Amino acid sequence: MKEASSAAQQAAIAIAKKKSGKYDKDGKRKDEARGTCWVGYQQVGMKKKGDKMVPNCVAEIYWENSLGEGCGYTFEFEKQPMMEAEYQGRKVKLGKIMQGDAKKFKVYVKNPKGNTVKVNFGQGGDAKGGTMRIRKSNPKARKAFRARHNCDNPGPRHKARYWSCRKW
């Protein structure tokens, strides 16, 4: 009984494949003009996904020169990994804003001497009743904050004002 239903199912699948136009007479998939990747993507080798190998599709970016003339497609490969450094004996990511311990936010950066430093910023902690909400979506509050902190000239990366202005 199971074999009969599976034979009927196989026949229905074969008919559906034939109607779709993506398969040849033998039931094997035809190669499409654009290949195995979506439009705007290019295959760059193969990668392992689970226990099988699949095409590695990378986005193509169309770019123009300074005269506005199209220069064609270029490939976007994986971005450079974030730099890591050692701070008080442990590895930390440089330039990544994260939840703070002493203040609302913290970030690890290198100062001009080349030392890794932790920059705490944002109103937080027990000093003034906990953390404050950033009202970035309120245009008046945003304008007032940026004027008060002189965000047009935020200063060096190893200072809290730089990171606070960048958040806003």
Image: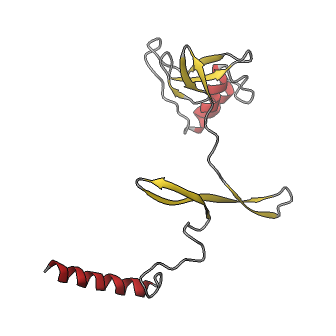
Total residue callouts: 0
Query: Residue 7: which quarter of the image?
Result: bottom left
Query: Residue 138: which quarter of the image?
Result: top right
Residue 12 place in picture, x, y as percent: 30, 84
Query: Considering depth in this image, is 4 or 151 the residue closer to the camera?
Result: 4
Residue at screen point 48% across, 54% down? 48
Q: Residue furthest left?
A: 1
Residue at screen point 64% across, 40% down? 80
Q: Residue furthest top?
A: 127
Residue 57 place in picture, x, y as percent: 57, 59
- Relative to residue 123, is residue 81 depicted above or below? below
Residue 143 place in picture, x, y as percent: 64, 33
Query: Considering depth in this image, is 74 or 3 the residue closer to the camera?
Result: 3
Query: Considering depth in this image, is 25 or 146 the residue closer to the camera?
Result: 25
Left or right of residue 71: residue 19: left
Residue at screen point 66% across, 29% down? 146
Residue 3 place in picture, x, y as percent: 18, 80
- Relative to residue 132, is residue 57 depicted above or below? below
Query: Considering depth in this image, is 1 or 143 the residue closer to the camera?
Result: 1
Please indicate, yes or no, whether residue 122 appears anywhere in the rendered image: no
